[in-house]
């Protein structure tokens, strides 16, 4: 559905520069500018590139004052763009009601306006909040609590006793509350430590596909409000993660780690057990943390093992020069040998 540029500006509290009557038929990104669409740019240096395309309009920061394209000025162009995406592509609406092909225990408590799709399983004493969506083949274990307006996509598994907050999105293939990896080694075998805790996921968390979060040995594994966790992330038993932390794909977090609020982790980060990461830390992709490592708040770290940004840069630069340095050392050793030979005569 097409909208006038001026109407889009009203939706995002923006200021129009240029022709506000321009028709916008869709939303796109910088990499694939298309005729009739609008996108955003964060920096003025990309303006000329987009002006040379057939794109219909741009969402820009206040620093961009003029263009051959009609503009919408806002303080945060990417945020405005994301909101317009929601307008053009609203979230799917799931039909309310409980499918006759779903299995719902008689002792389960089901709220108002709930969607439970075919072949979902709701076990004894589970509680499903108002407006929640439980999609096909999801498994909700005994005494699990699901908050209002949460969405569990197909083939998610929530083990017994776990608590999911409100407005949580859990994508397909996630397993919440499987046993933590706890064993005691003996000369004969590995003796399993019973995992009797649970997992608590607070409000507004989103878990990507195939995230696994282990139940605590004792107590709770906790994911704080507003966290966003990418696909294929493993979170071990008794881990605590603060609010609004972002964790990218293929990260592995061992047991009993403590991660602060507003932390950002790149992909393939690895944490040994009992690592502590402070609030607002930024962790580069592929970083590794040995067991017990502590990172103060507001640091930027990367590398394996992870080091502060400036220190890690110097180490990497030295590694890149190692072949050149090796040849220089060979040359110096040869010169020293020649000098020693002359002195001995």
Image (spheres, grey):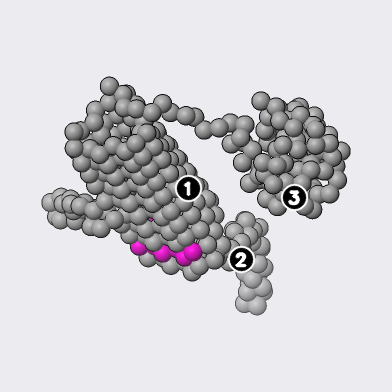
- The label on residue 253 is none
Placement of 130 over or under 118, stated as above or below: below
Q: Which residue is mark 2?
A: 310
Residue 110 in picture, x, y percent from top left = 28, 37
In the rendered view of the protein, which quadrant contains the C terminus? Answer: bottom right
Tell me: residue 150, above or below residue 304.
Answer: above
Q: Reading the chain from its start, which is encountered first: label 3 or label 1?
A: 3
Quarter of the figure with the N terminus? top right
Single out the mark in the foreground, 2 or 3: 3
Circle 1 residue? 228
Q: Which residue is mark 3?
A: 61
**Residue at the extreme left:** 188
Q: Residues within 10 Å of mark 2 (few under 14, many from 20)?
A: few
* Image position, residue 87 (x, y; %): 61, 35
Give the CA separation, mark 2 to mark 3: 30 Å
- The residue closer to the viewer here, 304 or 88, is 88
Q: Say which residue appears at 59% left-offset and 59% top-offset.
A: 316
Q: Which residues are magenta?
A: 270-279
Q: Residues within 10 Å of mark 3 (few under 14, many from 20)?
A: many
Up the image or down, 310 lies above or below 155; here it is: below
Look at 31% across and 48% down and name the residue there: 163
Residue at the image point whose x is 34% and y is 41% from the top? 129
Residue 271 forms part of the magenta stretch? yes
């Amino acid at each position: 559905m097409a909208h006038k540029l001026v109407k889009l500006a009203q939706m995002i509290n923006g200021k129009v520069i240029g022709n506000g009557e321009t028709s916008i038929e869709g939303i796109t990104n910088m990499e694939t500018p298309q005729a009739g669409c609008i996108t955003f740019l964060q920096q003025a240096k990309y303006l000329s590139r987009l002006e040379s395309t057939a794109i219909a309009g741009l969402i820009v920061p206040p620093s961009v004052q003029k263009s051959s394209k009609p503009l919408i000025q806002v303080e945060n162009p990417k945020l405005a763009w994301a909101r317009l995406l929601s307008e053009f592509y609203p979230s799917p609406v799931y039909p309310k009601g409980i499918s006759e092909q779903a299995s719902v225990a008689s002792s389960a408590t089901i709220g108002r306006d709930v969607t439970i799709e075919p072949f979902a399983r709701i076990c004894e004493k589970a509680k499903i909040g108002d407006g929640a969506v439980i999609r096909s083949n999801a498994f909700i274990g005994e005494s699990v609590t699901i908050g209002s307006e949460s969405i569990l996509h197909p083939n998610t598994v929530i083990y017994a006793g776990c608590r999911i907050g409100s407005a949580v999105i859990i994508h397909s293939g996630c397993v919440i509350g499987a046993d933590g990896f706890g064993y005691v080694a003996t000369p004969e075998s590995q003796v399993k430590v019973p995992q009797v805790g649970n997992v608590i996921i607070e409000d507004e968390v989103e878990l990507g596909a195939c995230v696994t979060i282990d139940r605590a040995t004792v107590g709770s594994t906790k994911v704080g409000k507003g966290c966003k966790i990418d696909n294929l992330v493993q979170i071990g038993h008794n881990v605590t993660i603060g609010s609004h932390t972002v964790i990218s794909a293929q990260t592995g977090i061992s047991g009993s780690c403590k991660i602060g609020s507003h932390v950002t982790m790149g992909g393939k980060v690895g944490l040994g057990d009992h690592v502590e990461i402070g609030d607002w830390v930024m962790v580069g992709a592929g970083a590794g943390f040995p067991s017990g490592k502590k990172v103060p708040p507001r640091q930027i770290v990367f590398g394996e093992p992870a080091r502060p940004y400036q220190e890690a840069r110097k180490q990497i630069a030295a590694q890149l020069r190692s072949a050149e340095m090796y040849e220089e050392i060979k040359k110096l050793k040869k010169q020293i040998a020649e000098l020693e030979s002359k002195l001995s005569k």
